[in-house]
Image: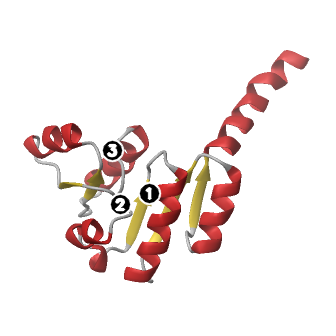
Amino acid sequence: MAGFGIPGREVVNLLARRKIAFVVVELNPATVTRCQTAGLNIVQGDIADEQVLRNAGIDRATLVALAIPDDAAVLRAVDLIRRLNPAARILARCRRVSTALEASRRGAEDVVSEEQLIGAEFARLTAPLLS
C-alpha cells in the first residue's frame, strides 16, 4: 500500500476489517511518525525506491495499491514492482487518462483515473439540470 491520504486510508480500513496483513509506504515523515505511534505497520520512503520496497516486503506482496497523487512516481513504481515481484497485482491511481493507459501497459492490472471519475461525476450532476 503506497500513500496514506484518503484513498490509501480507505484501502487500509478494508484490509484491517478483513484482518489482512499490510504495510503502508508513506513519503511524509510526520504522517509516518503519527501512524507508527498509533500502531500502524508503516514505513517512511518513496514507493519508487527499490530499498524502500524491499524493506516493506515486496517479495511477499500479493497486492500493491498505489494510492499516491503523483503520476510519474506511479509509473516508476509499477516498473519497479513488476521487476521485483512479477506476481503481485497492482492497483494504480492516476490523475491523467494518458498515465492510466501507460500504467496498464506497464503492468498495472487495475487503474483508476481521476480525470475519468471526475468527468463521469460532472456528467451525472449535469444531466438533471438539462431536463
Q: Residue at x 39, y 63 (%)?
A: 48
Rendered view: 77 above or below 35: below
Q: Residue at x 83, y 25 (%)?
A: 127
Q: Closer to the N terminus: mark 3 or mark 2? A: 3
Residue 89: percent from left, percent from top? 46, 72
Residue type, mark 2 in image: Ile
Residue 38: percent from left, percent from top? 11, 41
Measure the C-alpha gap from mark 1 to mark 2: 8 Å
Measure the C-alpha gap from mark 3 to mark 2: 12 Å
Instruction: Report the front residue among 28 and 109.
Output: 28
Rendered view: 85 above or below 40: below
Q: Is residue 23 left or right of residue 98?
A: left
Q: Which residue is mark 3?
A: 4
Q: Quadrant of the C terminus?
A: top right
Q: Residue furthest right?
A: 131
Q: Closer to the N terminus: mark 1 or mark 2? A: 2
Residue 97 in view (yes/no)? yes
- Dot in front, 1 or 2: 2
Figure colour scheme:
secondary structure
Q: Which residue is mark 2?
A: 47
- Does the CB distance between marks 3 and 1 fall below 8 Å? no
Residue 27: percent from left, percent from top? 30, 48
Q: Is residue 22 left or right of residue 106?
A: left
Res 9 quadrant in image? top left
Question: What is the secondary structure assignment of the residue under circle 3?
Answer: loop
Q: Which residue is mark 1?
A: 66
Marker disc for residue 7? none
Residue 85 in view (yes/no)? no
Question: What is the secondary structure assignment of the residue under circle 2?
Answer: loop
Q: Closer to the N terminus: mark 3 or mark 1? A: 3
Q: Residue at x 36, y 49 (%)?
A: 3
